[in-house]
Image (cartoon, helix red, strand yellow):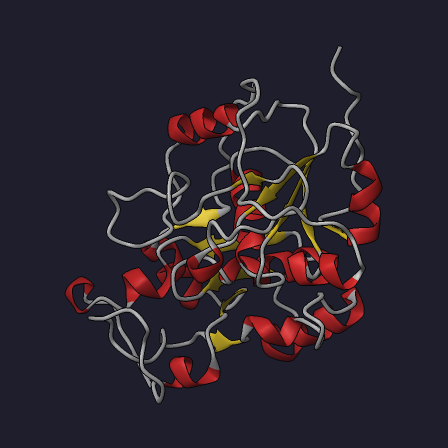
Amino acid sequence: MPAPATPLPGPLVAAEWTAPRLGEGLVVFDASVGEHRGAPRRIPGARPFDLDGALSDHVAAAPHTMPGAGEFTEEMRALGVDDDSTVVVYDAAGVYSSARAWWMLRAMGFDRAAVLDGGLPAWTAAGLPVESRPASYDGPRGSFTARPRPGLLVDGDTVAAALADPAAAVLDARTRGRFAGTAPEPRPGLRSGHMPGALNLPFGELQREDGRMRPAPELREAFEALAGDRERLYFSCGSGVTACVLALGADLAGYGEAAVYDGSWSEWGLPSNGRPVTT
């Protein structure tokens, strides 16, 4: 008989909350990307949420594009996720790509997921155990079924309309240099600058020095300093990853209407699409 589902305290959980529940049927995902992907160090039992691999649509022009519902369902089942599983996602950089995994699960209709606050660095700083092996899974298949929620991941046309909507705000999570066009884009072929009318909130400004998320009142203050009283927020970044850190911050701050631009600057910044760019 499967273990009863573990209730989550919210979209963000501490290492100290997670550790004693590892043996209670909790599904832990390592969503690390880039140089941290596949590193031989994991929270015990962690499974791979491979954003650089199977959990992105590699046919799409932009990296880290959300796969279709069928592909997402198959991957979650292969990783042993059930519809009533409780999921905690972390990454080795802190709170970075883990927020993307959390937002993807939400966009596919799954709310029983949370981000590990501070990620693997916070876990190790708390003196909690790690295994010297990459994240992996070879257990039984799960019963997960994706139930997509329209509006959580949006396209360029939706963002263009939001930029013209006085009731909405579009926030860009990239660094200030990339937003201003004074620092080069890391992906070749993209224009420098930002969408006319977008606002810049680098994702790191929502985090403390130790990599954990700032308290909810401070998060709310950071958003209101840019968006004012606008409650409908759209988030963009380089490839749809750190935009989800802003989405997590907005959720913690009490915003109820948030969306992530899936293609982000990897799509908007292409010279071929004709979208306006300013510096």
The answer to whether residue 107 is left or right of residue 19 is: left
Q: Residue at x 32, y 55 (%)?
A: 157
The quadrant of the picture occupied by the N terminus is: top right
Q: Is residue 2 above or below residue 114?
A: above
Q: Is residue 253 visible in this depiction of the protein? A: no
Q: Residue at x 42, y 85 (%)?
A: 177
Of residue 39 and residue 69, the one placed in the foreground of this image is 39
The answer to whether residue 206 is left or right of residue 67 is: right
The answer to whether residue 20 is left or right of residue 209 is: right
Q: Furthest-front residue in view?
A: 132
Q: Position of residue 185 (x, y in %)?
A: 32, 76
Q: Is residue 239 above or below residue 143?
A: below
Q: Furthest-top residue in view?
A: 1
Of residue 108 and residue 136, the one placed in the foreground of this image is 136
Q: Furthest-left residue in view?
A: 272
Quadrant of the image occupied by residue 55: top left
Q: Position of residue 32 (x, y in %)?
A: 51, 53
The answer to whether residue 99 is left or right of residue 197 is: right
Q: Residue at x 29, y 60 (%)?
A: 267
Q: Is residue 141 above or below residue 183?
A: above
Q: Is residue 147 above or below residue 32?
A: above
Q: Residue at x 51, y 23 (%)?
A: 77
The quadrant of the picture occupied by the C terminus is: bottom left
- Number of numbered callouts drawn: 0
Q: Position of residue 173 (x, y in %)?
A: 50, 70
Q: Is residue 121 visible in this depiction of the protein? A: yes
Q: Position of residue 179 (x, y in %)?
A: 41, 80
Quadrant of the image occupied by residue 220: bottom right
